Image (spheres, rainbow, N blue to C red):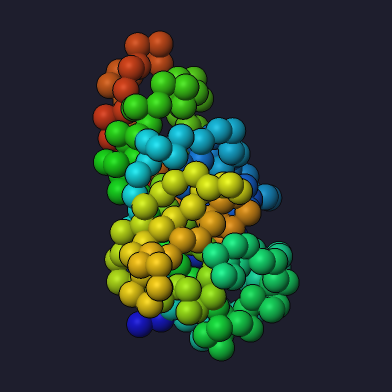
Amino acid sequence: MANVVVKDNHLTFGGVAYFRGHAEEVELGSIGEKRASLVKMNHLEVKDRIPVPKIKTAQTTVVDISFTRTSKNAFKTVVSAIIKGVPVKFSGDATFDKLKTGELKLVKFSVMNNDMKDAANASPKALNSLIEWGSKARIAHQIFVVMEASLASHYGNNATAELSVGKKGLEAKVAGKHSSSGSTTVEISAGTTFAYLLANPSWDARVKKNRTKITDLKNDQWSFG
């Protein structure tokens, strides 16, 4: 069922609104402060990231865009689509056309909230920064990337991707049904994110100076203002 709707400043899927502002700067595990504005795109101001070894896996699935509710005007910027495992830049118009014909697909990578909470709590530098940023502190725990269809097929049906640091950034590996090596790996480093969801930390103390750990992460969706 095609239930993804893309707008220039957000994307909706399953009733959840994902951010698109400054998406090219965001990775899984990026941390920073949420910036809201009535005249500019709401976005995550990326300042650091939770180390990849702490974030071990992500769930992946391929989603379909509703082109009856999505227009080419929503694709105004250059998109880095993953082709043969690495990012390749396309114009917004070309990305839209290739998604519509099925040559490209949209793939969602999600780190479970509790897994991201544990990863943040196990990363002292990132944790201290999140505490310091107070109520605006956020973590990117779900992202969408654009990928060639043949490659995306390996990441569908809620596959589990193993995350690691490659030569050029974050990589995601899944067991490949059609891969001679038995697995498929793609680069999902900064620059490849098309849209993302933020997690808002809850703490073990109300007063910032007394906080020592995150007790819960709640989804923080895109909205106006």
Give 189 or 199, whichever is nearer the viewer.
189
Residue extending furthest top?
Answer: 209
Please state the horizontal and vertical placement of residue 111, each as a whole percent of the image: 35, 49
Q: Is residue 117 left or right of residue 20?
A: left
Give 62 or 3, whichever is nearer the viewer.
62
Q: Is residue 9 left or right of residue 18?
A: right
**Image: 182 above or below 197:** below
For the image shown, how many numbered marks are present on the structure?
0
Residue extending furthest front?
Answer: 180
Give 201 or 186, whichever is nearer the viewer.
186
User: Would residue 159 be seen by someone viewing this image from the given angle?
Assistant: yes
Residue at (67, 50) in percent of width and height: 40
**Image: 20 above or below 214:** below
Please state the horizontal and vertical placement of residue 195, each as a whole percent of the image: 53, 58
Please state the horizontal and vertical placement of residue 145, each as a whole percent of the image: 52, 63
Residue at (48, 79) in percent of width and height: 150
Residue at (30, 71) in percent of width and height: 157
User: Would residue 65 be seen by someone viewing this image from the given angle?
Assistant: no
**Quarter of the view holding residue 115:** top left
**Image: 119 above or below 158:** above
Residue at (49, 52) in percent of width and height: 171
Please state the horizontal and vertical placement of residue 169, each as a whole percent of the image: 57, 47
- Say which quadrant the N terminus sits in: bottom left
